[in-house]
Structures are given as C-alpha cells and as structure tokens.
Amino acid sequence: MSTFPRYFDYAATTPVDDRVIQQMVTCLGQEGTFGNPASNSHAYGNQARQAVELARRQVAELVGAQAQALVWTSGATESNNLAIKGIALGDISGRRHLISSRIEHKAVIDTVRQLELAGHPVTWLEPDSQGLIQPDAVRQALRDDTLLVSLMLVNNELGTLTDIASIGRLVRAQGAIFHVDAAQGTGKVAIDLSSLDVDLMSFSAHKTYGPKGIGALYVGERAHALLQAQMHGGGHEQGFRSGTLATHQIVGMGAAFALSSAEMHEETRRIGALSAQLLEGLLKLPGVMLNGCPQQRIPHTLNVCVQSPGFNIMSLSHALAVSSTSACNSAAGGASHVLLAMGLSPEKAATGVRLSLGRYTQREDVEKAIEALSECLAAQPTFW
C-alpha cells in the first residue's frame, strides 16, 4: 500500500472501519450468527434476527428515527429508487407532479427522469451560483398537484448543505411528500428525523465506514401508507423490500453508525481543521478557486477548479486519489453535471477536482496534497 497515492476520495467510498469488520466476522462461518433472520422456528434464525434488530436500532439512533421506520436495502441507490418510484406508483390522490434538482446524485436524477418519460410532470430546480437549492425556489415550484419533492442533504460533489428543515416545512404545508437523499450526511452532520418534516430518507453504509451493498430507507408515517414495494418475493421488511437479509452487512452498517454516533463530534472537529488547512493551501496556488458555498457546507468535501491550461487530473494520480467528478459521473464520462448546472462552461467544469477527507486523513496527507498540486501547476500561466 505504500506505493498507493494519498486517499482523498472519501465521498466516493470509505474503508470499512476495523472495528466494524470485527463485528461482521461474527456473522460468518458455522460458529457465527449465520442463520436466516426470517427463520423464526429455531435458535439460529432468532439469533440472526436479534442481530438485525440491534443494527436497526443503531442506525435509527444516529438519525433520530424510530427503529421500525427503517427498511433495509442494498444501498442508497435502491433506497432512492424505492422512495421515488414507490411513492409515484402508489399515490391515488391524483397528484403526479414531481420536483427535484439538476444537482442531485444520478440515482435520483435518472429515477425521476424515468418517471418523467412515463408521463409524470417534473420541475427541475436550478442551483444558485453557490450550488445551493434555496427554499424559495422550492416554494415557487410547488403546485396543488405536487406529489413528491426529492432533494439531497449534502451534495456529493460540492459538500454544500441543503436547508431541508425549511424546505420540509414548505413541502408539508403543501401536502406533498418530502424525500431526502442523506447518503453523504450520516456521520458528518446531525440528523434528527423526529424534528424534521421529512417523510423518506435514504442512507448508505459505505459512505460511513461500513460495508458496500447495504443501506436503509426511513419511511415516515405519511409515506408509509403510500409507498409501494419495488422488489417482490416474500414480503420481507414490512412488505416494502423482499429478499433474505444479509445479516453480516446489516450488522456492519449498525456498527458503523454506532461508531459515528459516539465519535461524530470529535471527528468533524478534527476534519474541519484539516479541511481549513487544505483549502487555505490550495487557494494560495495560482488559478485555484473553490466551487460551492464556502459557509453552508460540510468540511469533509472540497471542490475546486484548477484553472491552468497545462493541468490534467491524471497528472495527480501518482500522488493523490481524487475525483474529477462523482463516481456516478466518472462511470458515464463527461464533465460534472453539478458544475455545469451551476453555470460553469464545459471547459471550466472539466477542470473541477473533488478532494474529500475522512477518518484516516492526517496532516501529512493534507501537506502532500498541497505540495502535489503545487508541483503540477509550477510555472504554468493561469487563465479565466
């Protein structure tokens, strides 16, 4: 691993915490908690079910929810699909209008687009120049036939924070359902669903030092009667998501969220100091500018444009593991849809670099990142 670049791509995925791995291993092998949680007639199944329910409580504690309101999924992408399609296909009130934004994760954008193709009218909100979806934009978009509003808590490319408390009040007053993709928020910002006007919220373990392949969807009371399952075959998870539960992954998600409950405050303080050091160092370099609001954001994610004609992100790959865009965009190719939506030209958006910090980032990593980018920009004129 010593030849690997410094890791600055925590927004794409996080390593599983060793303490989480230890808990997951207890669910594997013939001496472990390997039973099917749905097998109620013997001790093996009951033991597995108890482990699953403990994990459900651990996840619920971090986000201020009732444990029974959480439905296990394979990750935030499935949670987003279940939330959006499940409401759109389950409502019988005659409402069909959907609201989302052009800076959402592709798991939301592509899902909403599918419904748009199927005949649902959609309003696509534009961000302001700082990459924020303002409550007033939502207020103006709401209609009498609005069924669902879907917006993210933390933007995965910019790190900007959406004012979901204010937006939730507007959506609730209009009688619509509010879905929030919180994949990038858990363990980074305080979430209290008991005090928020949020009906559905998506989570993913692998953004919070848990395993890939497991996530959850919070289903509030208002959404519970409307939501329609998208995966059938046994009626598991209150009928919302069929399939044998992956006990080891669920236990891993619970353990990861429990660690975040205990350590989030101190971890965010430490990462905040490192992020401030990194941003200060980067902005001293010629041609580097911050994308997104400098105040309404989490410290974990920074997005900058490197405005130098000789710069190429691949020149950083030997020293830094960073992204030019989100992993979902990287898979599809092209400039960041988030930066384009903010009004950046395709040429300028193509110079975007996302650096995301996490639990294992150290001061020497930050110093190396500044040094590596400085070397790339040495003696190169700026433009724009």
Image: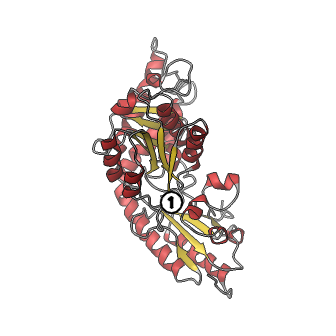
Residue 97, how many percent across, how many down? 47, 40
Residue 260, how many percent across, how many down? 40, 49
Residue extending farthest to the top is 41
Residue 89, how many percent across, how many down? 51, 29
Which amino acid type is shown beneath numbered disc 1? Tyr
Residue sitting at 67 percent across and 71 percent down?
347
Q: What kind of colouring is applied to the model shown?
A: secondary structure
Q: Nearer the viewer, residue 379 or 336?
A: 336
Q: Nearer the viewer, residue 35 or 101?
A: 101
Is residue 162 among the parts visible in the rendering?
yes
User: Split into 4 quadrants, where in the image is the C terminus?
Assistant: bottom right
Is residue 8 among the parts visible in the rendering?
no
The vertical placement of 60 against 169, above or below, is: above
Residue 104, how many percent across, how many down? 52, 52
Residue under pointer 1: 360
The vertical placement of 381 against 47, above or below, is: below
Asked whether, in this view, residue 339 is left or right of residue 275, the answer is right
Residue sitting at 63 percent across and 64 percent down?
324
Mark 1 secondary-structure assignment: loop
Asked whether, in this view, residue 198 is left or right of residue 351, the answer is left
Total count of labels: 1
Residue extending farthest to the front is 144
Q: Residues within 10 Å of mark 1 (few under 14, many from 20)?
A: some
Asked whether, in this view, residue 20 is left or right of residue 310, the answer is left
Residue sitting at 39 percent across and 64 percent down?
296
Residue sitting at 53 percent across and 23 percent down?
242
